[in-house]
Image (spheres, rainbow, N blue to C red):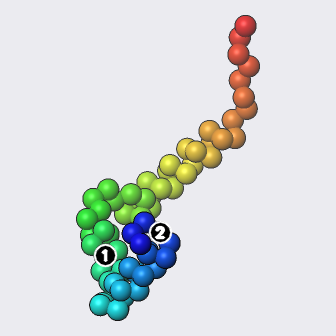
Amino acid sequence: MAGTVTGGKKAAAKNLAKDPNFYAKIGKKGGQNGRTGGFAANPELARIAGAKGGRISRRRKTEVAA
């Protein structure tokens, strides 16, 4: 029953029966392959970006000259 909810549950149960840490290992591999860094790697950059976004969102809307 590939592609159905029931089939997915059966596959997940089979994976866990073979290896209780199956999904943890899959997630670990994905996390190790990440190369983007992001805000978690640089909190100061996150603070600066958040401040910029906050300033922009609080600006008054400018009237379009007709």
Question: In this view of the protein, which residue sits in the foreground, 48 or 17?
Answer: 17
* Residue at numbered disc 1: 26
* Residue at numbered disc 2: 4
**20 is higher (above) or lower (below) than 8:** below
Work out whether mark 1 precedes mark 2 in sequence or the reverse, and give the earlier one: 2
Q: Quadrant of residue 56?
A: top right
Neighbor class of circle 2 (other Cα within 10 Å; few <14, some 14-19, many 20+) is few
Q: Quadrant of residue 62?
A: top right
Residue 44 at what x, y percent from top left? 44, 58
**Of the two numbered discs 1 and 2 in the rendering, the one whose residue sits closer to the viewer:** 2
**30 is higher (above) or lower (below) than 37:** below
Residue 46 at what x, y percent from top left? 47, 56
- Seen at 47% across and 69% down, the residue is 4
Number of marks in picture: 2
What element does badge 2 sit on?
A: loop
Q: Quadrant of residue 52?
A: top right
